[in-house]
Amino acid sequence: MEDSETFRAAVRARVAAMLNNDASPYDPALEILGLASGGLPVDDGDEACHSLALIWGELTDRVELRSAETDQAENLMIAAAREWLTVEGDREAEPQYFDRWLHDVLGYECPPPSLV
């Protein structure tokens, strides 16, 4: 991806496809992961590139590595996609989305507070 706006448009298209289809959300989720991890735009300060790679990587890993969690992971994919469409572009809501999904839902540890 050449810039974050192109990246975001591509993610929106995959999310919309996921939500407008009765098929498993896994394939569009894997495409989002590919966009985020395989073609990151030049770092222009857009947290979405990195955070979406972590979110969608974890959700697709659950399907691939823990098949007993497939239904739960697919439900989380749909929820993450729906919620992304409501916050995407809102520079105040996006960090809250990333924080909630990465730490509260997926269990990534929060970094320690800065002592500076």
Image: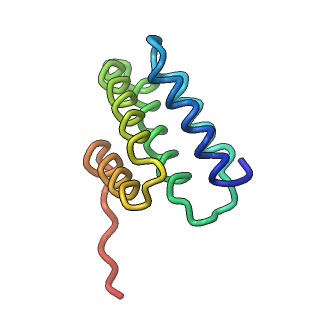
Count up the numbered dots: 0
The residue at 50%/31% (across/down) is 15
- Residue 22, image x and y in percent? 44, 11
Quadrant of the rendered image containing residue 109: bottom left
The residue at 29%/47% (across/down) is 107
In-image side of 11 versus 102 (left or right): right
As drawn, 13 above or below 100 = above
- Residue 33, image x and y in percent? 56, 37
Foreground pick, 54 / 98: 98
Residue most toward the left?
104
Foreground pick, 112 / 50: 50
Residue most toward the right?
2
Q: How is the image coloured?
A: rainbow
Task: For the C terminus, give its image quadrant.
Answer: bottom left
- Residue 19, image x and y in percent? 44, 23
The residue at 30%/71% (across/down) is 112
- Residue 70, image x and y in percent? 36, 20
As drawn, 20 above or below 36 = above
Residue most toward the bottom?
116
In-image side of 100 versus 91 (left or right): left
